[in-house]
Image (spheres, rainbow, N blue to C red):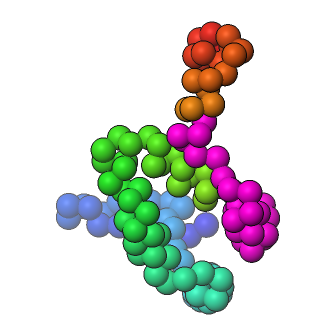
Amino acid sequence: MATATVTVRGAATSRKNHLTIHKPLAAALNHAVRIIHAICGLAGSATLIDDIRADLTADKVRAAIRNRDTAVVFDWLTAALSYQGISDQVAHDYMEKHGRATWQQIEQGLDRASCPKLKTYWHF
C-alpha cells in the first residue's frame, strides 16, 4: 500500500490506507450511474411524485390527513391496495362490478354485528 503525505495545519503527517479513486474505478462507477439513470428513465415517470401529490389532492386525501379524517384515508387506501398483485384492469373491473369496502359500510356492519367479539378491539 502506498503512503500519502497530508498537510494538516502546516505540519506534515503520514497517513496509510488513503482512499484514492483510480481511473478504472471512476470509469466503472460512471458507467453504472449511466445504466441506472437510463433504466430509471425507461421504467418510471420523471413526474411520479408530482403526479401522486396531484392525485392525493384531487382525492382529498391530503386534506383528510390534515383533518384526521380516517374514513377518507381508509377508503382511498383500500382502493389503492386493491390494485396490488393483480392487473389494474382486472382489479378495476371487479370493483366496478362488485364495489369496494368503505369505512362507512364497515362501521355500519360492526354496529349491527351480533358477535360480542366485534364490539371493540378489546372485546376481541
Report the residue at 46% width, 81% height from top: 47
Where residue 118 sits: x, y (%)?
A: 65, 18
Position of 71 compared to 33: left or right? left
- Residue furthest toward the left? 10
Report the magenta stretch's main SS.
helix
Placement of the N terminus among the 4 image quadrants: bottom right
Give residue 68's quadrant in the image: top left
**Quadrant in the picture for residue 109:** top right
> Which one is nearer the viewer's eye here, 66 or 120?
120
Residue plotted at (79% across, 69% down):
90
x and y percent of residue 36 in the render? Answer: 63, 82
Q: For the C terminus, which image quadrant?
A: top right
Q: Is residue 52 magenta?
A: no
Closer to us: 123 or 4: 123
Which residue, as the protein is rendered here, is positioned at the far front? 112
Above or below, comparing residue 22 to residue 18 in the picture: below
For the point 60% across and 81% down, which residue is it? Answer: 44
Front position in the image: 40 or 11 = 40
**Image coordinates for residue 60, horizontal then vertical, percent:** 38, 59
How many dots with numbers?
Answer: 0
Residue 97 vertical placement versus 50 (above, below): above
Tell me where the magenta segment starts and ends, as one range.
82-106
Q: Which residue appears at 54% of the width and 83% of the height?
A: 45
- Above or below: residue 87 compared with residue 38: above
Coordinates of residue 56 in the picture (x, y in percent): 43, 64
Q: Is residue 68 left or right of residue 43?
A: left
Q: Visible in this render: residue 93?
A: yes
Check if residue 104 falls in the magenta segment: yes
Q: Is residue 56 visible?
A: no
For the residue pair 124 and 18, the one nearer the viewer reads as: 124
